[in-house]
Structures are given as structure tokens and as C-alpha cells.
Image (tube, grey):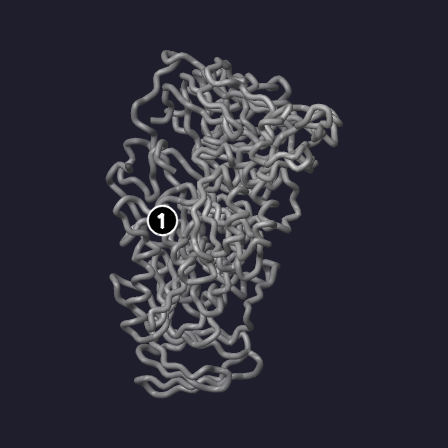
Amino acid sequence: MREGDGGAAGRPVRVVILAAQSGPLEQAARRVVLKAGVELVLVLRAGDPRHFGERAQALRDARPDVVVVPLADKGGAEELVLLAEPLRFGCAAQSPAPHVLLATGDDGAIARATPLLAPFDVELVPDVRGDSGRIRAVTRLREMRADEGGRLRDEVLEELAARLAAERSTAILLVDVVGSSTSLVHADPAGGLLAAHVRPLGTGAAADRVVARAGLDRVRRWIPWAVDQPTLLEQVFNRARWPGAVPTDSGSLAVEIALAHEAIGHAVSDALAAGIGPQLRAVPLVVLTGRLAELAPAQASLVAVDALELPAPASIAREQEGSVVPLASFVPVAPTRRGTVRFAWSGAPREERVERDALYALPLEGDVDVSGAGVTASHLVAGPVGAIVDGRVRPLSLPLRDAERVPLVARWYASLDAVPRDPPPVAQEATPA
Amino acid sequence: MSWRYGRWTVDHPLPVGAATRAAEGVSVRAGDVLATGSTITLAHVADGARRVGVAARDLDRVLRVRPVVEVRKGAVLARTGRRFARAATSPIDGRFVHITADGDLYIMPIVDEWSVRSTLDGTVVRSDDAVVAVEGECWALAGLAGYGPDAIGEIALGVDDPDEPLAPPRVDVRLRGHIVVGGSRIAAEAITRAHACGVAGLVAGAAPAGGLRTVFGDDIDARGRASFDDRPTVLCLVGFGSGPLPSAVWDPLVAFAGLRAAIHTASARLFVLAGRDEVEVPAAAPLLALADDHGSVRPVPPDARPFPANVLPFDAER
């Protein structure tokens, strides 16, 4: 599913969480924000070290459309005083004024919090730690995003993930990276769905936000040759302000791949902060869509393998017109000792002794059963990339110095034949609109 | 179309703590102060409703002063009773800025003052604690990203050619208070030198993103960053890195040299306060192309066929 196919990005909705009570309540609020696909611009906690004026200025600068206030009890509402007053001072004059979602089932909390949030339009939803509260809050936020009559891309992705999981009777992780958003959708055959739609975070219009979040060096480290920081920054900034920009040489393609790495990595981090990270990654099938699905199979597979850091063997595929096209099977091998992996497939069985830090692809295609020491026995499906055997230490640790890092990363790209090359020239006859 | 003459409404966002504001309907000129205030720091809280013995919702009835106002230490903020009076007083010399939902009163020390100036000749059409908006007629050029505070000054050309980068030696104190037009690029050295020389603002096709980070901080992005502090003002018109200006953009800039102008960084626009007949501009917007490595932007001749990939008109929604 390409960007723009099947669903709209929707209106941007900026959300602030006033986390008077952190811990599970804040995690639950973050899960709502991730599932709803809105932009989380600020999380303000009661213990925030900034003083009143700085909090108020931060809230004014955030220009929230919605303020989510999760509360467990009246004690939390008392703490809310420290956050509600800066909100009143900073945003009371904002036009349009922010809409407040007060998420609590406690009558005492409601009675105390309502006057504190008085100047704003306050809507009550149940506690977001429960399913009813979460669903209600997500629905409300998505209503604010939706254009009239249009379906959101996030909803289309969730439907696709649920359908694929039901058809294949297996849990799947759908990974979607487009210009301004990155989505991770986990679906299981029983109908369970976990989703993290992170925006703005992507390889196009939100490319600069990836750099702002990750740092330039973390993006640069995925490029298999030396690139100086100023050059990379200019490429990223121009890409962010050029709608629909397509890579036209190996350099711009490498930047796109590097951005995709970090965008997925940060979407996973956000999911972890919301308490849903481990479940997301424990899947036998990863399906790639959006810009990832348009990359060469080896490049897409390498991005998925490195950015997701899958803990167990998995099949990697891409979505094409609603169906799943296998790309590779991925076999991580515990790097503590020399592992032996056995592959049973339609061809002759193979046994591989995997060295620590090894990364290579075996030319296998179709159904593959893997087993062996340090490997979870699994049934996988390989595609044109083959079976990727990975004995690298996780989490991946890349040297800081170019002289050490670039040869290492270049070797990984080369071992899967994923080195970015100049794409075919693109030209247009029509006057651009 | 690149340059447009029309009636524009410009929002001037205010920091928190505005003490004075221009009233709606007032006529202003570019550079006039629209609002002033002080930086809000640590709040001193004075018991209000509890102190004077009224409910928080009734406090307004017994207030002697209302936010935002300067007060002296001991000044009565609210009072009830006659013979046995109960009063809430200010604990410090400062500014009474806020009343809480519980009826407490926030007083801040005045540490430094800020002011926001108009970027248009026109009329104030909205004035509240968040924004002062001014409406007026002038020429406008929509750029890509603005950084720093708004700037007002006369336009001066810092280069002779739209393909030429602004060389730091071309910037000196004679350009104090001017908006200097660079050509294809303004390096960080030119930006900091211009600021040191008192140049009001810089406009060019592009600026190096790394240089902008050096001057404005590592957390800036490609969408610009409006601020109120003492920093340079930079407006990038077409991109980052290098961006020679198309003649449809450059030629009017040359014609506008010496006229009053303003950079509004929040909307990344250059306003030139000149009459409609000052210049003639082509109706069609010039075309721009992103370089293959995405590291720069260049103008595309209108008769170029086929177009390279990644071509957009100057006025495309970006």
C-alpha cells in the first residue's frame, strides 16, 4: 500500500498529556495517543522541574488541540493543580481553545478536576486503563483527525493487519513507513490488535523530525559510506520541505533507508514507553508497507531486521495490492557461542555453523523449517533475499568513528546485496502542479 | 506566482505574561510596539479567596486590582470587611498576573521585558493574551522557513547576482538596521557577522542547515523557528544548502532595494511596504528543482523539457 493509497493521513491533531499521576496511567494515555495516530507534542508531569512560567510557555508553544488528563483518583486531581494552572495561564486565550479529555472513572477526581479545567471545553471519558475508556478516547481523537467521509490510513492498516492475521492464522506485525508517519500494527488471529501510529515521524515531510528525535549521528550511522554531517542535514531538511520527493541517486536513497531505520526504531521506543513494545516484536511474520515496500527486497529486509531487532525467527514480506509477497526469512542466532542452524526446505537440507557477528543470506526460497542450538525452531517463508542468518550481538552497537563503523555497515549491506545504487532516471514532461 | 500584492493579516504570537497590548482598531506602522511584557519566572502565591473569606468564584467581586498589573510589596490585591478588614496583599514588588481556580493570586518578579513589534503597516484586528493580529496591504513573498525574531528595516542588496552567496566581508556596520538580501546562500559566518553589525535580518535562497543549527540551536527543524530573544533573523526562500534565486524573485528584490520591509518568521514571509505599482511581477510562478542528492535547490528554466524529477513551482504548498 503506497502513500496516499487506501486512506488519508487526516488532519494533524496536537495532543498534550497532563500526567498528574505517572506510571501505568501515563502509559495507558500514551497507548491511546499512539493508537489514535495523533501528534504527542508534550507530556507534562506533576514533578516537572520547570517553574510555573516555563510550564505555561511550554504549553503555549505546544499549541495543543486536545489535552488528555488521565486521573485515577482524587489524589491525582489534587496534583493536577500544578499542571492545570499553567494550562489556564498559557492556553486560555488560544483560538480555538484546546479541548480537554478528562479520563477518569472516579467521582472525587471529576468533582475536583472539573473546576480546575473550567475555561476549557471538558469531555469526560472512562479511565483509559480499561478497554472502554481506551476505545472511547481513541475513537474521539480519530474523529477529530478524520476528514469528512474519508478513511484514515491508520484504520486501513489495522484492517489489513487483522485480515492477514486471520487468513494466515498467525500473529503478524505490519510495519508502515511513509513521508510523515510510521506505524507498527500487531494483529493476532484471535482478533487482538495493538497499534502505534507515530507522527510526525517518517522519511519524507517528517524526515527532519526523525533527525530532531534521533540525532544526526544516529541517522548517519546507517549510511554505508562516509557522509559529513552538514551535507546530510541539508539533504534531510530539503527532503522534509519537498512534498513527494523521490530518491534520484544512491545518496538520497541511502538517506531514505537510514531515515527508515531510525523512524522504525523510534516508533518501537514509543511503543515501549506505552508498555506495548515486547508484544509487538514477538511475531512469526513481519509485513512491510508504504515506502519500505517500495525499496529493493534486500534493502527493505535489512531495514526491518536492524530496526525492529526481532528476538526470534520470522518471515519478512511486503504487502502488494492486499496480498503478502515473501521477501526473506530471518534467523537470529544467539551469539554467545558458535551456533548451528539446520534448514529443511524443498531443496537439500543445510546445516550452517554461524560465527559470532556473522550476517549473510542463504539462497533458499519458499517454505523453510529452521532449528538448531540457540535458535527457536520455526516454520518460515523465504523470498528472493533468501534466509538471512544473523549472529550479531543485540542490541546492535555501532562504533562512533567513521573509520570503524563505515566498513562494518558497508559489510552488512554488501552481505545481503543491499548497497544503494542509483535508481533509474525519472523525468516528467508535464508542468508540475 | 512568487510576489503577490494584497491585503494580509499577520498574527504576532505573544509569549506568556503580556502586560500591555495594542487595542483592536488601532492603526500601526511596521516596527511599532504591539505588546510588552516580562518573562514569567517563579510565581509567588498569595492566598486570595481563603484569605479574604470568600468562595473562589466570588473573588472577582472583592479584587482591588486585576491581572495584569504592576504591584508593590504589601499592596492590597483583594479585601473584604470594613471595620475588621481581611485583605490579600502582594508578597513582593512585581506583576500580578494570574488568579487560580482555587482563588489564589500569582505575583511574579519583573526580571526582563520583552516587546513584540508589528511587521505590517495596518490596523490591529485581534488583540488578546495569545496573539495580536495586524491587517494591512503590501507586497509579500512567501519563503520556506524563517528563524529568529521578526525583523523590520530597509532592503539592501548584499550581492550583485542571484547565484552569488553572501560573503561575510560584504556585511558591515553600514548595513545596521537593514534587511540584507543574500543570493544563493548565507553561511553561518555571514549570519553571525550580520548580527554583530546590527543587521535587522537576512534573506536568501538558502542557508546551510548545519550553520542554522550552529546559530539557532540543535533542536531546530526545517519548518523554521520564530523566537523573541536577541538572535539573528534569517529567511530561507527556496531551500537549504544552496538555492540560487529565480529571476522572477530576484528582479523585484532589486527593484525594492531601499524600501521598508519586514520579515515575519512565524509565517516565513517577507513583506515589502511599497505601493502596488512599484514593480511588475510575472504571473506564472518560477519552477524549482531539488538536486539529485537533495542537498540543494536550483531554478529550472521554464522551457526545460523534460523536467528532471522533483520539480515544483515556487508557490507550491510545502
Give the chain of mark 1: A
Q: Which amino acid does label 1 sit on?
A: Val
Identify whether A291 is placed above or below B278: below
Q: Mark 1 points at which residue?
A: A246
Q: Quadrant of residue B195?
A: top right
Splitting the image into 4 quarters, where does residue A282 fall?
bottom left
Q: In this view, does B286 lie above or below B278?
A: below
Depth check: give the residue in front, A174 or A362.
Answer: A174
Q: Nearer the viewer, residue A371 or A273?
A: A273
**Residue A102 located left or right of residue A185:** right
Q: At 24% across and 40% down in the image, what residue appears?
A: A429
Q: Is residue B143 left or right of residue A293?
A: right
Residue B184 % position (x, y):
48, 31
Q: Where is residue B175 in the image (x, y as percent from the top left)?
A: 59, 19
Count of residue discs: 1
Residue A263's x, y, as percent?
Answer: 46, 56
Position of residue A231 in the picture relative to residue A370 (left or right): right
Near mark 1 (Cα within 10 A), the count class, few <14, some 14-19 or many ≥20, is some
Check the picture and name the quadrant holding the C terminus of chain A: top left
Secondary element at image label 1? loop
In which quadrant of the rendered view does residue A1 lie?
bottom left
Residue B169 shows in this picture:
no
Q: Which of B104 and B42 is in front in this view?
A: B104
